[in-house]
Image (tube, helix red, strand yellow):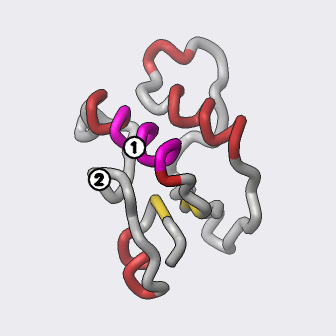
Amino acid sequence: MDWFFGDQLIGFALKLRNPPPINFVTTTDYIRPNQLQGVLDALRQEDVRFVMWYSGLPVSISGDASGNQLAPLLAYLQTNYHVARVFSNHDLI
């Protein structure tokens, strides 16, 4: 069974496992820095094959990243993953 992060409904439907302690990320303070670190740690440790990126999330680090709590995750994804599919709603996998 493959690892998948980013959309718990798709993961459930496809019988994929979600390794991080949370099911999704947001650009708001709903996601705490320690939770985001947990996502990064899980992606690294479990060699997660698929990541679903919601179209409402930033897709790149532009300008000053100091206010963007997702910057470390984006940097990791840009270095270690590539876009395999862009869906009609602009979500990425």
Task: Check residue 54 in the rendering and tell me which mark sits there, or answer none.
Answer: none
Q: Nearer the viewer, residue 63 or 78?
A: 78
Residue under label 1: 39
Labels 2 and 1: the sequence-earlier one? 2
| Residue type at tag 1 | Val
**Is residue 22 placed above or below 26 in the rendered structure?**
below
Q: Position of residue 92 (x, y in %)?
A: 64, 61
Quarter occupied by residue 77: top right
Give the SS element for disc 2: loop
For the C terminus, the image quarter is: bottom right
Indicate whether 74 appears above or below 15. above
The image position of residue 40, as x and y in percent, is: 45, 38
Q: Nearer the viewer, residue 89 or 93?
A: 93
Disc 2 and disc 1: Cα gap in Å? 7 Å
Q: Which residues are magenta?
A: 37-45
**Label 2 crowding class (10 Å Cα cut-off): few <14, some 14-19, many 20+?**
some
Residue 31 appears at what percent x and percent y?
28, 39
Q: What amino acid type should be assigned to the residue bearing mark 2?
A: Ile
Residue at the image point whose x is 50% and y is 66% from the top? 3
Q: Which residue is mark 2?
A: 22
Q: Main SS type for the magenta part? A: helix
> Is residue 54 a member of the stretch shown in magenta?
no
Residue 9: % across, % down? 38, 77
Mark 1: give few (<14), some (14-19) or many (20+) Cα within 10 Å.
many
What residue do we see at 58% from left, 35% from top?
74
